[in-house]
Image (spheres, rainbow, N blue to C red):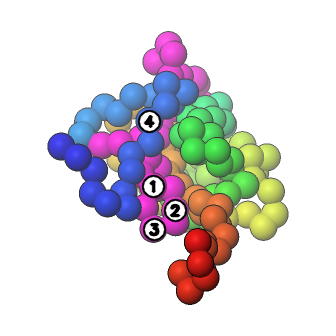
Amino acid sequence: MSEPTGKRAVHTAGAPRPAGAYSQGVVAGGFLFTAGFGPQDPVTGAVPEGVAAQTAQVLRNVAAVLAARGLSLRDVVKVTVHLQHLRRDFAAYDAAYRPFFEEPRPVRTTVGSDLMDILVEIDVVALLPDPGPGPDPDLPG
């Protein structure tokens, strides 16, 4: 099945393979949208212990998808985070999250969710670089 015009999937071996019918990322409308990633190591499948270590691994997974399109966490404008234990783990997750993002930090939503055997899942929206003005259609080519 071909991809719709203006919508392109992003794939990389640097992030865990999809566990279902979804792409690791999709480029559309000037943005890259990532899937929600868990803390699985993309090579071994291992999941680190604790919310801080899991947060760091999730953000490395997200960064790998961004890098597949020449982007980095600096290009992220929106972050959505799901925590298995919102009240218990928020402070440790937030402390682990902070070093990954520079000012101005992206907007962020953090919610409690029923996750499958992990403590954190994160997806992001990143802004693609402005390609700049195209050729002026009124000027000779």
Residue at image coords 67%, 70%:
132
Residue at disc 2, secondary structure: strand
Mark 1 lies on residue: 27
The residue range painted magenta reads 22-50
- Whether the magenta-drawn stretch holds residue 127 is answered as no
Residue 91 visible somewhere in the drawing: no
Residue at image coords 45%, 55%:
27
Mark 4 lies on residue: 11
Do tag 3 and tag 2 residues touch (Cβ < 8 Å)? yes
Q: Residue 31 carries which label?
A: 2
Front-lying residue, 76 or 88: 76
Q: Which mark is residue 29?
A: 3
Mark 2 / mark 4, whichever is N-terminal:
4
Quadrant hosting residue 5: bottom left
Q: What residue type is labelled 2?
A: Phe
Residue at disc 3, secondary structure: loop
Mark 1 and mark 3: Cα distance apart in space: 7 Å
Mark 1 and mark 4: Cα distance apart in space: 11 Å
Mark 1 and mark 2: Cα distance apart in space: 6 Å
Residue at disc 4, secondary structure: loop
Point out the image quarter for the C terminus.
bottom right
- Whether the magenta-drawn stretch holds residue 42 is answered as yes
Q: What residue type is labelled 3?
A: Gly
Disc 3 packing (10 Å; few <14; some 14–19; many ≥20): few
